[in-house]
Amino acid sequence: MAVTIWHNPRCSNSRGALQILREHGIEPTVIAYLDTPPDATTLQALVAAMGTGARALLRTKEAAYADLGLDDPTLDDAALIAAMHTHPALINRPIVRTPRGVRLCRPPETVLEILPA
């Protein structure tokens, strides 16, 4: 499995995680997720691999979060994933997948936990 980063170049955390990967000799597949949003199946797989639930990936400060009522605790992962797919700005970043796991890399140094051996 290759290393993949769901990246927003305007985000300092995302740039930092990408820099750490490159400093370790890893040139990941970079997905500009705002331009190419992950489909619901991919988001579901990332959430499952992280073991955190979809809510952990939500950017709560985005206007769409309030507009869509995503603070409703009764919403399940499927509803949250559908919202993130439709409104990719709701996806927190960067998400990095390596052969050792998937992490939301905030702070960027979190990527060190899953660097390939």
Image (spheres, rainbow, N blue to C red):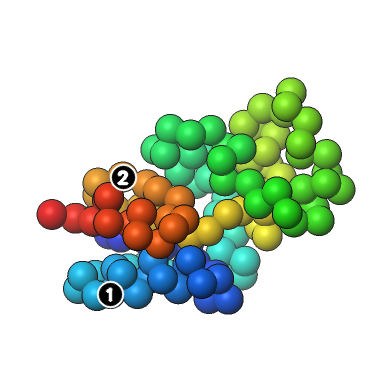
Q: Nearer the viewer, residue 29 or 111?
A: 111
Q: Residue at x 66, y 51 (%)?
A: 59
Q: Is residue 100 left or right of residue 96?
A: left
Decide: is 5 above or below 9.
above
For label 2, the residue is 101
Residue 46 spot, x, y in % from top left: 45, 43
Residue 87 spot, x, y in % from top left: 72, 55
**Quadrant in which the C terminus appears:** bottom left
Residue type marked 1: Arg
Element under disc 1: helix
Decide: is 77 above or below 64.
above
Instruction: Determine if residue 68 is in view.
Output: yes
Residue type marked 2: Gly
Distance from label 2 to label 1 (Cα)? 18 Å
Q: Nearer the viewer, residue 90 or 37?
A: 90
Q: Residue at x 73, y 54 (%)?
A: 61
Instruction: Determine if residue 41 is in view.
Output: no
Q: Residues within 10 Å of mark 2 (few under 14, many from 20)?
A: some
Residue 20 spot, x, y in % from top left: 31, 70
Which image quarter: residue 40? top right
Which image quarter: residue 105? bottom left
Q: Residue at x 83, y 39 (%)?
A: 69
Decide: is 30 above or below 39.
below
Q: Residue at x 77, y 48 (%)?
A: 65
Which image quarter: residue 109? bottom left
Residue 103 spot, x, y in % from top left: 40, 48
Q: Residues within 10 Å of mark 1 (few under 14, many from 20)?
A: few
Element under disc 2: strand
For label 1, the residue is 22
